[in-house]
Amino acid sequence: MSLLSRCPVVPVVVLDEPEQALPLGEALLAGGIDVVEITLRTPAGLPGIRRLSALPDLLVGAGSVLLPSHVDAAVDAGARFVVSPGVSADVVGRAAERGVPALPGVATATDLMAVTALGLDEVKFFPAGLLGGPAAIRALAAPFRDLAFMPSGGVTAQTMGEYLALPMVPAVSGSWMAEPALLRERRWDEVTARAAAAVRR
Ligand code: 3PG
């Protein structure tokens, strides 16, 4: 199954502490979201991925993957997909060697030609809000008829529906379901409520 057809909403998470990982994963699952991207932006990212990989129903991936060495570290920790802010053939190649899907970030038609040359059919569109939102995806996607897009960056509970109305957008991603303040304050019920609202939309 394609990564983007699994769940229409992919939470992007910056963990402060590895201890946040399991309650977060359980809160998302309780809300009906079974995929999560844990960024490697903090030292808690890799140990958080390791903890979440113990939840059999949750597909955990790594975000902010910039280098092939990050792919190795993430997959060794249990990540089952990797997301990058831009296009790197080296990252995509290492992900293929490690047997996990890569989701590179695109912002231009040149990026889209690069991912097409790499044989990919799913991309992240980043930062979606600043690039012009759904109208930008519609325009950029026109020559790339076989590509599916996951907008990320500036997508909100209020705007996600406009993106998902596009046929080439099977999923969106964003941090609003699991923003750092919610995790710090251990507001797991609120995470579940936001996750449930997002999948209901
Ligand atoms: C990110 O870069 O963290 C993701 O694209 C999510 O962005 P957001 O915080 O605007 O949802």
Image: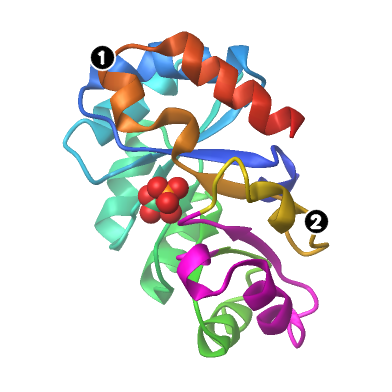
Specify the segment rendered in magenta.
125-154
| Residue 165 falls inside the magenta stretch | no
Seen at 62% across and 50% down, the residue is 172
CA gap between label 1 and label 2 equals 36 Å
x and y, in percent, of residue 65 in the image: 34, 55
| Residue 140 falls inside the magenta stretch | yes
Neighbor class of circle 1 (other Cα within 10 Å; few <14, some 14-19, many 20+) is: some
The mark nearer the N terminus, 1 or 2, is 1
Q: Check if mark 1's residue and mark 2's residue have beta carbons within 8 Å.
A: no
Front position in the image: 158 or 105: 158
x and y, in percent, of residue 116 in the image: 63, 80
Q: Examine the rendered structure and indicate whether residue 73 appears above or below residue 200.
A: below
Labels 1, 2: front one = 2
To which residue does mark 1 refer?
19
Three-letter amino acid code at the position of disc 1: Glu
Q: Quadrant of the C terminus?
A: top right
The answer to whether the beta carbon of the residue marked 2 is less than 8 Å from any atom of ligand 1 is: no
Seen at 83% across and 62% down, the residue is 167
Q: Quadrant of residue 46?
A: top left
Q: Examine the rendered structure and indicate whether residue 67 appears above or below residue 6.
A: below
To which residue does mark 2 refer?
165
Q: Is residue 146 left or right of residue 28?
A: right
Q: Quadrant of residue 193?
A: top right
Q: Is residue 35 left or right of residue 187?
A: right
Q: Is residue 160 left or right of residue 58?
A: right
Which numbered marker is on residue 95? none
x and y, in percent, of residue 165 in the image: 80, 56
Three-letter amino acid code at the position of disc 2: Ala
From where the camera sits, is residue 56 visible? Answer: no
Seen at 40% across and 11% down, the residue is 23
Seen at 47% across and 55% down, the residue is 154
Front position in the image: 119 or 113: 113
